[in-house]
């Protein structure tokens, strides 16, 4: 590994080699004083200067502030005051409050809104030594799987500039994949962590609702959205996800779903006792052949690692998707209408596309919302009962690899119809399962391919353990894009 070779040879790390390290590897080198926080920060700022003009991943950057914090971190390390994330440069999705930075969620309706305080998860990361470089771009109000808005423009996929990095955490995924950030934080109400991670070839965890407090996120987590929307870590390796989750998780009264359930960061799974069910088609959106092959290859790899792996698809996934649509599309539309009334000219094309699509659906009534919430709980009970047989599920992240910028949108008029191609993630937002996207290969034209590993509520320990075994078993060639 690169980290081991740097230590063994005692060679000074080049900026490129530093930004190719994972957050965990960088933290280890800082603890051992093999590299300094200032070296790390300068490497990342140099990488941003080189790559950001091509990708347009950030909505704001604070290089002078980040470098000053790196100098303070270096002084602390030299005095043996080392924290879990000392000197680690991170980025944060621009829908999550970072004190003093804009929190606009890509919308003219929130232009120049400055966060008055850090979201609890950001405060916890900073307390652990992480340094925020800036925040990253999103589609307007997070309502698309493609990252483009009228404030900052379009974000490109690091592997192919003509393609989308996904959304709504697309800027975050692009920044991490390209080595402009060691790790970061996204949010996920229908795949918004997992899809960009999949499109950009990194790892992304959608935790159980309440595992990481969503306090300080815009739009706020409340009502039915507290059941489906979460915040979670994004990084280049599974150990990095575990490290960030350990720091960020814990109870906070500002999140109505928040739970004090402890996360076991030291959990080690026994492949002989953990059964995995896999499916390559959800029965609604047939995946592309490359996606099917990726899931089959991942299933075979896990079987070779000692797991019992069998074909299995939970019942009623189609109904889960429909109930998710009632919340994410219909309830969001209900809230959006008064917000945008009279300001339609201020909306980005992506948000106008969502509003137009939602207008074609039946209006959400109080009775239908109540029935949705009750049926959701009953459906969740049935799916979790089925998961007693298969505590881990393996499935596509979405039906397609990263699509071309012009192809994304809501409805069948778009080649990459979000309502169809992204269903594989939407099921588990409705059901509240933790799920991680992990890269396992590439398409023939070099686009990343990943799979989704799904677990039972509050069993992020199992999900991450399986993901780590899979990720370490599959060697993907290629350097930082």
Image: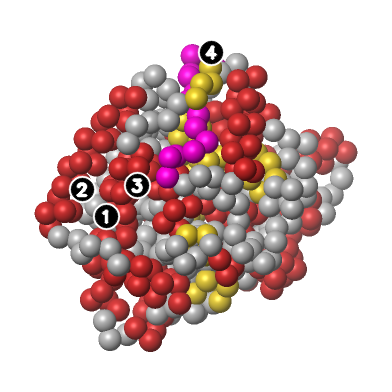
Dots 3, 2 in contact, CB < 8 A = no
Image coordinates of residue 307 in percent, x first then y, are 56, 18
- Estimate the spatial distance between the alpha carbons at disc 2 and disc 4, rounded to whole Å: 38 Å
Front: mark 1 or 4: 1
Q: Earlier in the sequence, mark 1 or mark 2?
A: 1
The answer to whether any part of residue 295 appears in the image is yes
Q: Say which residue label 1 marks.
A: 326
- Estimate the spatial distance between the alpha carbons at disc 3 and disc 1, rounded to whole Å: 9 Å
Image coordinates of residue 168 in percent, x first then y, are 47, 60
Q: Residues within 10 Å of mark 2 (few under 14, many from 20)?
A: many
Dots 3, 1 in contact, CB < 8 A = no
- Read off the magenta span: 271-284
Q: Say which residue label 4 marks.
A: 272
- What residue is at 59 percent from the left and 59 percent from the top? 403
Q: Earlier in the sequence, mark 1 or mark 4?
A: 4
What color scheme is it?
Answer: secondary structure
Q: Main secondary structure of the magenta part?
A: loop
Q: Say which residue label 3 marks.
A: 321
Mark identifier at residue 372: 2
Dots 1, 2 in contact, CB < 8 A = yes
Q: Element type at marker 3?
A: helix
Q: In the picture, residue 249 is in which quadrant?
A: top left
């Amino acid at each position: 590994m690169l980290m081991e070779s740097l230590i063994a040879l005692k060679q000074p790390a080049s900026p490129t080699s530093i930004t190719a390290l994972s957050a965990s590897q960088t933290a280890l080198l800082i603890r051992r004083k093999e590299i300094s926080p200032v070296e790390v920060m300068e490497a990342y700022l140099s990488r941003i200067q080189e790559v950001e003009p091509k990708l347009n991943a950030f909505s704001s950057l604070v290089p002078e502030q980040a470098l000053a914090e790196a100098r303070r971190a270096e002084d602390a390390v030299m005095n043996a005051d080392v924290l879990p994330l000392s000197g680690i440069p991170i980025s944060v999705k621009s829908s999550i409050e970072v004190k003093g930075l804009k929190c606009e969620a890509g919308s003219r309706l929130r232009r120049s809104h400055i966060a008055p305080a850090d979201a609890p998860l950001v405060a916890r990361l900073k307390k652990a030594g992480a340094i925020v470089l800036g925040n990253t771009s999103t589609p307007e109000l997070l309502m698309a799987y493609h990252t483009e808005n009228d404030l900052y423009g379009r974000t490109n996929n690091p592997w192919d500039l003509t393609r989308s990095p996904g959304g709504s955490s697309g800027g975050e995924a692009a920044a991490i994949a390209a080595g402009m950030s060691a790790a970061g934080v996204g949010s996920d109400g229908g795949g918004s962590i997992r899809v960009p991670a999949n499109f950009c070839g990194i790892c992304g965890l959608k935790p159980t609702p309440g595992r990481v407090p969503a306090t300080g996120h815009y739009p706020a987590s409340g009502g039915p959205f507290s059941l489906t929307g979460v915040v979670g870590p994004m990084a280049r390796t599974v150990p990095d996800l575990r490290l960030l989750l350990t720091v960020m998780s814990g109870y906070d009264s500002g999140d109505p779903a928040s739970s004090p359930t402890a996360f076991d960061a030291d959990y080690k799974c026994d492949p002989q006792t953990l059964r995995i069910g896999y499916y390559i088609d959800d029965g609604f959106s047939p995946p592309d052949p490359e996606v099917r092959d990726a899931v089959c290859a991942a299933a075979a790899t896990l079987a070779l690692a000692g797991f019992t792996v069998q074909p299995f698809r939970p019942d009623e996934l189609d109904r889960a998707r429909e109930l998710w649509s009632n919340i994410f599309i219909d309830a969001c539309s209900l809230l959006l209408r008064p917000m945008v009334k009279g300001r339609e000219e201020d909306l980005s094309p992506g948000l106008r596309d969502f509003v137009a699509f939602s207008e074609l659906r039946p209006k959400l009534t109080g009775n239908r919302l109540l029935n949705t919430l009750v049926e959701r709980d009953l459906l969740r009970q049935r799916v979790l009962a089925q998961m007693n047989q298969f505590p881990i599920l393996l499935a596509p992240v979405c039906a397609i690899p990263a699509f071309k910028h012009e192809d994304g949108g809501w409805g069948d008029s778009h080649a990459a119809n979000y309502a169809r191609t992204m269903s594989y993630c939407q099921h588990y937002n409705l059901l509240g399962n933790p799920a991680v996207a992990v890269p396992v290969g590439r398409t023939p034209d070099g686009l990343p391919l990943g799979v989704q590993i799904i677990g039972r509520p509050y069993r992020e320990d199992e999900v991450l353990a399986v993901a780590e075994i899979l990720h370490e078993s599959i060697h993907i060639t290629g350097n930082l894009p």
